[in-house]
Amino acid sequence: MQSILEASLSSYRHELLISNLQGIPLLLQHGRADDNVPVFHARLMKTLLEQVSGSSSYLELPKEGHVFPGMMATRPLANFYQSQLSPDTNHAKTPHEFTLTVARPSDTTSKYGVTIAELITPGQLGTAKVVTVGQNTTKHYYMSTSNVRTISIACFDQRCPELTLDHQAVTITTKNQSSLALENDVGGGWHVLEDSPVVRRASGLDSILQTHGRFKIYSGRNMSESAMALQISRNMCQYFNADADLLYEDEKNEQDNGNIIRIVITDRINLSPSFNTASPRASNTSSVQVTDHDGNVHSYDSDNGLGAIFINQTLTDRSELVIWGSTESGLDIAARLVPMLTGVGQPDFVIADRNMLWKSAGGVLAMGFFDRSGRASTNSYFS
């Protein structure tokens, strides 16, 4: 459980992602009298940037705290802005060597044309180390990866560079495209994805906040579900100034590009329905099921407020957060985990009952990450 909680925070632990800052000009400015965020963090970042040859400058203001008048217009900061915006500035070109590190692919864009789109094991870091030889049309990429399932490489001058990936020479036959997508068969080597688009699925409950439009909050028509929808909408507005449309399930209107929050009270739910081969349970008890990486079905029942919250992996163009309870009490348990705080990472799914209220994470029945097929990954937890 501790490992999952730590992994859920990886996108916010910038010291793990420090390699991505190589070659990017940075100015670090911190008040030494800051009693909110200790100056230690800025000093650590400065040291880490030096270790990866980061292009950074460090400014520590002896008498200033966390917030002070003119903090966005100090002379060093103004000079930094002017130097970066000057037409005479020679911005960094693609280095001959660089490393891209990703905690959650949906949180990280490309670096020098290289994008990690999917990890083999979610919840663990993925890396791509790149060494380039040659220039322009004669450029050759030598890449080594760790925990990477799919990767995308930008093409140059209407052709992709020659590529050696994890000591495998990749034959490139696709021409005149903007990027080259490759997939790791995990044991069978890499191959080019000729037509299939690279899907970067959202991961982590808090990924619901990365919406491109108004939230759609769907609920049933009973009082408990609609009241919960209203409460979540209020929180979204208060904490994020975010708009949301409150709709009933029989008013489905999911044509725009906003993320979806779905509130459900039913007797049973399956978090990975496509892979549940178990026979229906002959029981009057409410239950929730999830299938693990090896195809084993884990089933949980409880009369103590059973609830679950998870990212629906069946959508590819946007995210859907499902908040489920077997009863009103179970829905209340799951809804407590609706991500209202940025910087506080959460896994892809959590199953719990009222024991979570006094045991915290120790009272969780199951939690973890989904793999590409919608099953729980190998590093998930089941009680």
Image (spheres, rainbow, N blue to C red):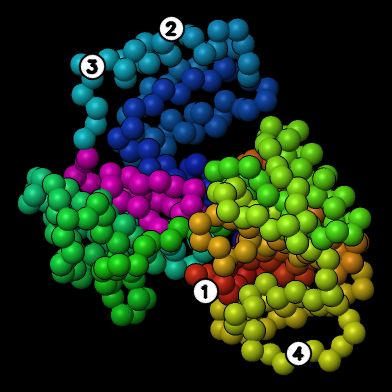
Q: CA distance from mark 2 to mark 4?
A: 69 Å
Q: Quadrant of residue 81?
A: top left
The stretch of residues the image draws in magenta is 94-117
The answer to whether residue 65 is above or below residue 4 is above
Residue 288 pos. (x, y %)? 77, 75
| Three-letter amino acid code at the position of disc 3 | Pro
Q: Which mark is residue 87?
A: 3
Residue 257 pos. (x, y %)? 55, 49
- Say whether residue 3 is magenta: no
According to the picture, the residue beneath numbered tag 4 turns out to be 280
Q: CA distance from mark 2 to mark 1?
A: 52 Å
Query: Does residue 345 appear in this view?
Result: no
Q: Secondary structure at mark 4?
A: loop
Q: Is residue 21 left or right of residue 272?
A: left
Q: Residues within 10 Å of mark 1 (few under 14, many from 20)?
A: few
Residue 126 pos. (x, y %)? 42, 58
According to the picture, the residue beneath numbered tag 1 turns out to be 373
Q: Quadrant of residue 297?
A: bottom right
According to the picture, the residue beneath numbered tag 2 turns out to be 75
Q: CA distance from mark 1 to mark 4?
A: 22 Å
Mark 2 or mark 3, which is nearer to you?
3
Q: Secondary structure at mark 1?
A: loop
Q: Quadrant of residue 340?
A: top right
Looking at the image, is mark 2 or mark 1 earlier in the sequence? 2
Q: Residues within 10 Å of mark 3 (few under 14, many from 20)?
A: few
- Say whether residue 112 is magenta: yes
Q: Which mark is residue 18?
A: none
Residue 88 pos. (x, y %)? 20, 16
